[in-house]
Every structure is written in structure tokens, then in C-alpha cells.
Image (spheres, helix red, strand yellow):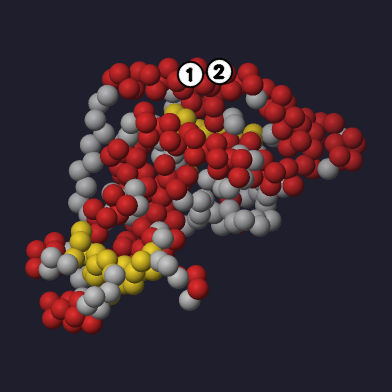
Amino acid sequence: MKKNKGKRKIYILYTEKSEKEFLQLSQMTDKYEVFYQFIDSEKMVRKILEKNKGKDILYLTPSIKLLKIFSELKDYSEFLENSMKAIYIKQKLEILVKNKPVEDFFRRIFDIVMSITLLLLTSPIWMLTIILVKIDIGIIECLKSPMKFIKNPSFFIQKRIGKDRKIIKVIKFRSMVIHNFDDYSKYASEKDERITWIGNIIRKTRIDEIPQIINVLKGEMSFIGPRPEWDILGYEYEKRIPNYQLHYSILPGITGWAQIQYIYGSGVEDAKIKLSYELFYLKHQSILLDLIIIMKTIKVIFLRKGM
């Protein structure tokens, strides 16, 4: 009870039972005490309003019908976008990525200049990380068999879905032992047994992401944009998540609005939450928003929180 002290109450009234899972994407529980109520009649709404009369409660609903009847109710979609900086993914969306040639030009120039600069500045980190990843088989083993050390891969290349559903090969420093993906979960957990000792370090410090600079330099990615999804998972999300195809409207990024708003998760439910933030970025994309993302990303890295 103490945890919810001081939080404003929000009642989310919905008229379709299947809708609830999408209404829970807002992550409002950090700021509000949220209650979900299925509504099967107008009479039920009146009872709720009468019962809580005089209380400081915000009533939200995605139902256009209820919004027309009850002035006390506010549009869930508008609240989510204005207050939580996310988009209600189940609504009919017509988010069009506007052609901004000037902004796109400067964004590409920024990507190229930053890629070259970071490649030069991080070159010592590259060399050290390459060696440390190679010796994850054990120092004694490396000394006994130098060829094993040389052949042990430092990089991990994975197929991801890029802009316009084009398949790209994303490059990262290898943070896991070499294994058969069919024998393990598609998602990495916090204490995943596959993660090596050096892998754990480079994941927490985001060093494993550095090689993606090459993808940015090649024009396959940008520094800022939706997270490029593993093709196997991406195809699954397309079938199970409304409007997921909009994810491919722009170049994917190393960091983005979704990554800084919601810590890295796994599974379809987390993918829905990520998409709600990514759609907000697609709709409100600007150089100012990009600068905010860069500043917040730097903060996330120094606080060692996952993205």
C-alpha cells in the first residue's frame, strides 16, 4: 500500500475483453495506480462514476461510443500519447513517415561523421575486447593451443530486419558461448548461462553494441531508430502484434526512444510495449527528439541500465 501512496488513480474502462492486454502497454503503473474495468453496459459506467463521485480519479477509455456518452471519460489514446509518450498500438493507425530531405541529409551526415569518429576513438576498446572475447575458452587452453585462440570468434553476426523489411547482418561483439540456438530460448535472461564472464561486462557497459557502428557507416542502420529485430522473432511479432509492420518504416538504430523508455525485455508482451514507444518516435521524429534520445542514452550507459 505504501508503494501506491501519492499516486493518482486511473480507471481504464474497456468494452472488449481481448482489448485489455493492449491497454496494459502504457507502463503507467510507475506513475499511477491503475485499475482496469470491463464494461458491458452504460449503466455500469454510471454506477462507477456515482460510486467514486468527488474522488480524484482519471477515467480513460478507448471506446469512441463511451466517449460520446460520458463527458467524464477521456480518450485513452490521447492520454497515452500526450502523457506517456507512447502510441496505443491496437487503434487504426495511419502514421506516415514524412519525407524530410533536409533533416534526412543532416542525419546521414551525422551518422557518417560520428561513425568515423567513434571508430577512431574506440579502436583501443576494439583491440582489447577482441582479445578478451577470444580467451573466454580459458587462458591455459589458449596457451596450449594458439590456433584455438585465433579461431575463436570475437564477433557475432545475426540476421535482423531493417528498413522496408530488408534483411541486414548486424555485427556485435560475441557475449555468449558458441551454442546451438535450437537448444535454448530465443530470449536472453539476466542470468543466462550462455553469457560469458567478459560477455556480462560488455553487455552491461554496452560495449557489445560498438561494432554496429559499421552497420551505420554502411547505411543499413542509423544511430537513432527502432531496434532491429532478429528476423525469426520479427516474423513472429508481425503475426501477433497489430501495426508491427510500421516498425520497418525507417532505418533501425543502435539506440532509440523505445530503448531509453523501457528497459530491455523479452517476449511478445515486451515487444508490444517497445512498439508503442517506437510508433511515438515515428510520429514525432525530429532532430530535437533525436538530441533528447542521445542525452538520455548517455545517461543510461553511465548508470549501467540495460537498453
Residue at 30% in and 38% down: 284
Q: Is residue 193 visible?
A: yes
Residue at 59% in and 40% down: 301
The residue where tag 2 is placed is 116
Identified by mark 2, the residue type is Ile
The residue where tag 1 is placed is 112
Mark 2 closeness class: few <14, some 14–19, many ≥20 residues within 10 Å:
some
Mark 1 closeness class: few <14, some 14–19, many ≥20 residues within 10 Å:
many
List the single residue furthest toward the left: 69
Residue at 85% in and 36% down: 142
Where 40 falls versus 298 (above or below)?
below
- Give the camera-side residue of 110 and 133: 110
- Quadrant of res 175: top right
* SS assignment at label 1: helix
Q: Are marks 2 and 1 in contact (CB under 8 Å)?
A: yes
Q: Position of residue 105 (x, y in %)?
A: 35, 18
- Give the camera-side residue of 289 and 254: 289
- Quadrant of res 77: bottom left
- Residue 213: assigned label: none
Q: Is residue 159 visible?
A: no
- Quadrant of res 60: bottom left
Q: Position of residue 79 (x, y in %)?
A: 27, 55
Q: Position of residue 205 (x, y in %)?
A: 64, 40
Residue at 29% in and 70% down: 56
Give the number of marks: 2
- Give the camera-side residue of 210 and 27: 27
Identified by mark 1, the residue type is Ile
